């Protein structure tokens, strides 16, 4: 395994099997994206109220969302990069709303597991620096998401 993933399920609704699939999927994505071995990621499964508060406090949007990522490897203005070959990269945290994932799975007509996988990959790509603020960025990121999910076998 490339990634060290720390799961926190505040909802008690995600099974060990589902977490294992997410872990395998993100390790597959990490391999494709050439992520260094030992990289660390946190994944939290939360309810809509919790993600609404996070979305409000960090993005200024007072509403629940499906997934939020906090990249730890991004340098802020004036920050100094610390480079040490012995320290595994701390990629960041992915926070997924389980009620939103269930709602969207139903809306899009696919399984909860597929939606959970999609949201995890989406959040993971954000941790790696991908974004979708412009049309070009969106095309690149969404193409990568689709490719990873299809190649892994988690299709609609």
Image: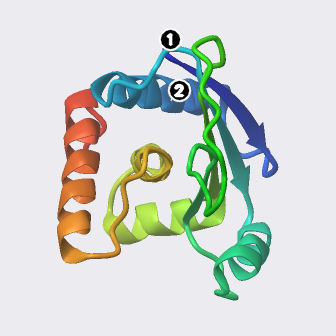
Question: What residue does disc 2 label?
Answer: 23
Of residues 130 and 54, which is closer to you in this image? 130
- How far across and how far down the image is residue 105, in percent? 43, 61
Relative placement, left or right, of 51 versus 26 is right
Location of residue 55 with respect to 32 vertically, above or below: below
Q: Which quadrant would residue 34 be assigned to in this image?
A: top left
Relative placement, left or right, of 135 versus 54 is left
Circle 1 SS class? loop
Of residues 148 and 115, which is closer to you in this image? 148
- How far across and how far down the image is residue 139, in percent? 18, 63
Question: What residue does disc 1 label?
Answer: 1
Circle 2 SS class? helix
Residue located at (42% from left, 25% from top): 35
In the rendered structure, are the residues bearing label 2 and label 1 in contact, judged by CB atoms less than 8 Å apart? yes
**N-term mark: 2 or 1:** 1
Residue located at (62% from left, 59% from top): 76
Residue located at (79% from left, 68% from top): 50
């Amino acid at each position: 395994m490339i990634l060290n993933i720390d799961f926190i399920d505040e909802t008690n609704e995600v099974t060990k099997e589902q977490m294992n699939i997410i872990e395998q999927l993100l390790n597959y994505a990490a391999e494709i994206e050439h992520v260094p071995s030992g990289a660390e990621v946190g994944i939290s499964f939360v309810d809509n109220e919790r993600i609404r508060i996070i979305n409000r406090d960090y993005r200024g949007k007072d509403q629940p969302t499906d997934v939020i990522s906090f990249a730890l490897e991004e340098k802020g203005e004036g920050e100094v990069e610390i480079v040490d070959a012995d320290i595994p990269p701390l990629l960041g945290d992915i926070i997924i709303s389980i009620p939103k994932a269930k709602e969207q799975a139903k809306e899009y007509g696919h399984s909860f597991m597929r939606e959970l996988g999609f949201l995890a990959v989406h959040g993971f790509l954000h941790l790696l620096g991908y974004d979708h603020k412009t049309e070009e960025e969106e095309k690149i990121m969404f193409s990568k998401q689709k490719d990873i999910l299809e190649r892994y076998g988690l299709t609609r």
